[in-house]
Image (cartoon, grey):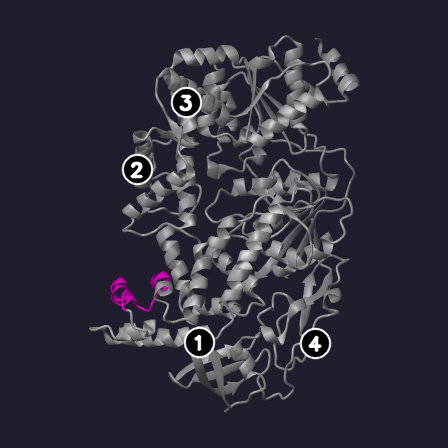
Amino acid sequence: MKNSDFFNMLNNKYGINLNEQQRTAAVHDKGPCLLLAVPGAGKTTTMLCRTAYLILNGVKPESILSITFSRASAKDMEEKFKKMFEQGLDANPEFSTIHSFAYKVVRRYYYKSNYKFSIIEDKDKIKVLKESYSRYNDGEKTNDDDLDNIINKITFVKNMMLEDDEIDNYPFPDENTIPCFKSIYLDYEKYKRENGLIDFDDMLTECHKAFINDSTLLEELRNKYKYIQVDEGQDTSKIQHEIIKILASAENNILYICDDDQSIYGFRAAYPEFLLKIRETYPNAKILFMEENFRSSKNIVAVCNSFIKINKKRYDKNMVTNNAEGGKVKIITLDDTVSQYIILTESLKDLNEREAAVLYRNKRSSILVADYFIKNNIEFTMTGYDRSFFNHWIVNDMLSFMKFASNQKDIVTFGMIYRKLQGFYITNAMYDTIKYNKSDNTVFEKLSKIKGLQEYQVEKIKELRCKTRRLSGLNPHEAIAFIESELNYNKQMEFNKSRYGYSVENQKNILFILKMLSAEIKDYKELKEKLEILEKQLKEAEDNKTCKIVLSTIHSSKGLEWDDVYMIDLINGEFPANKSDTEEERRLFYVGMTRAKQNLTIFKCNNRFEETVVPSIFINEAEKQGANHISKSSKTFKKPQNAKTTTLKEKDIQDRNVPVDFDFEDLFKNESSVKTYIDKDAAQVGSKVKLRDMEFDEILDYTIVVSSEADPMKDKISNISPLGSALLGKKKGTEIEVSTPSGKTKYEILEVD
């Protein structure tokens, strides 16, 4: 069929009108070709049209193999092809993931070799890795983060085709260190060999081995698949490229469809360097471009096009569009991250028929925004929530500290936390001594009776007892901060960084989320219950596939589009992540921006939970490329700075840069007032009080705060801790008594500021 006849048929029969660049790609038939397609360029339509073109020009449908990144994409392409060409083209070309194709090859190879195998079950894989980790790390148990890191590193090793002697010194893309990883990896590989097992990654390595060792099988497959198309080529790993190269090498009729500017899976061993150097493998490869974006407005395209050109390791493309001008890309500067949720709630209340997405770098960002949406009756769906948060070791640590404070006889819970008490010198031997002591004494009484303790150990036990009693009188919101500072959990986080490579920023992020969820919570049991309910609500939201509001990581948003896109939690050290490939992180930011069809809003925050943070460098880069920095003054809630405040409405408010049409005043029309005391010498909300613990003769400083500072709509006197409530209205020289789960504590008020 002549090219002109093919294009007329597409237009007249199937309603498909390709532009010039798409047409050039659709009629490429022989030899290697790299097709570089910008976001929204219609690459799937073009690839399917090329498939039809090959069939109409005599290529057998079964000799065309189209490989894509995920099972969902393969199924979607197959269905689209049938729908597009169901009239007049009775053909079923093969659409497959690389793993599915490789698995078929491995099955054939093992069958011919009379080798029996099974795929290792997840529970067995986890068991082997946990046991191996413990064996090489002095009996230490692995947590979920470590386990994920081990599995990701194994995937990386296999996909990058690393030899065993390369592992120790290889610069893995993540910053997390797994002690004795090589030994754990080799143990796991040995276990699989001895038990006739393979895993998901082995499908690729074994397929590659089959091609090398079985020339008959390879030739059979080469004769079957004369044309190969690789979709999302920028996400293909080194071993995947090798498999495809070997399979196609007889005639090299291979088409790579990709966008090097959207390569965002380096942590999974994506290998875009292959595409940048494609002519080293295929000297005669054609390089074609599809640069028209059919998705986004002119303003969005202009900012994104200039933004990605900051990267140097890329093909030079010039993204354009014929769509309408649209509104400016907005950068909204806020003092704190919580204000993002307030603005989002207002903006998403009335979408009408529009679709919107809230995008973020890390899954954990979904927790707080989802919680805020649930509180404000905003229906949403999710592309995946952070399941690991609800069982994260830091969350479990905080809950264990609070649980033990409420029952200081709980030796089991104490066993979960004593190693985390940096600077209190509770040794394994000390814990083992009291572990089987069946007396009804508290843990501290048991510790104090251990023979041979040094004087400094006795003093530290006394100090820990005193601080644990104080902890028992705090609500969870206050307790987390107390554990971090007074029980030295901040030092534990530093230890986690030096020992395992966990960044302190990421650990603090977990604590920040838990603090925010703890607002309005009275005690440990209520917090635990809230976390259980929230996890269930997020699972239900994930299953809701019909909602027009989507919460998603940027990675999961790839290939999708929405009318309105909001990008949140853009903080340096997290986006770009520390020690990451800055160009890949910039590509990820670009992917997020290019999901927007009509409106793109980027939030820039300077504080998170009263700690100064540095906004992502990518925000300023986007602003320099034409994004509109909104600096319209408005009012928002601020923590009280003095003791004269009498109601919530009278609390100090400060300027924030927010959209012109957003009015924070509306949020404060119906809130309940917080009871405080007019006497300027009396303690009230915001007062700093110096106290003396009358039993231990210890001086402490305490600030009376409302635990729900994060949500000004719901501040109530009941959300102040028991100690804070007892202090309200009291003056210098007064003695107070506070009931806690561990008993009553008496304090003398020394100063009120």
Q: Which residues are magenta?
A: 415-437
The CA span between labels 1 and 3 is 62 Å
The CA span between labels 4 and 1 is 31 Å
The answer to whether marks 4 and 2 mark residues whose Cβ atoms lie closer than 8 Å is no
In the rendered image, is residue 105 in sight? yes
Q: What label sits on residue 317 in the rendered view?
A: none
Label 3 residue SS: helix
Q: Confirm whether the magenta stretch covers residue 531.
A: no
Q: Between disc 1 and disc 3, whose residue precedes?
A: 3
Q: Which residue is mark 4?
A: 650
| 209 with respect to 102 (left or right) | left
Residue in the picture at 31% in, 48% down: 134
Q: The disc labelled 3 sits on which kind of residue?
A: His
Q: Between disc 4 and disc 3, whose residue precedes?
A: 3
Q: Confirm whether the magenta stretch covers residue 418.
A: yes
Q: How many residues crowd around disc 4 within 10 Å: few (fewer than 14), some, or many (20 or more)?
A: few
Q: Nearer the viewer, residue 579 or 515?
A: 515
Q: Which residue is mark 2?
A: 187
Residue in the picture at 31% in, 34% down: 191
Could you tell me which quadrant the N terminus lies in? top right
Label 1 residue SS: helix
Q: Between disc 4 and disc 1, whose residue precedes?
A: 1
Q: Between disc 3 and disc 2, whose residue precedes?
A: 2
Q: The disc labelled 2 sits on which kind of residue?
A: Asp
Could you tell me which quadrant the C terminus lies in? bottom right
In the picture as drawn, the residue positioned furthest to the left comes out as: 452
Name the front one of labels 1 and 3: 1
Q: Which residue is mark 1?
A: 470
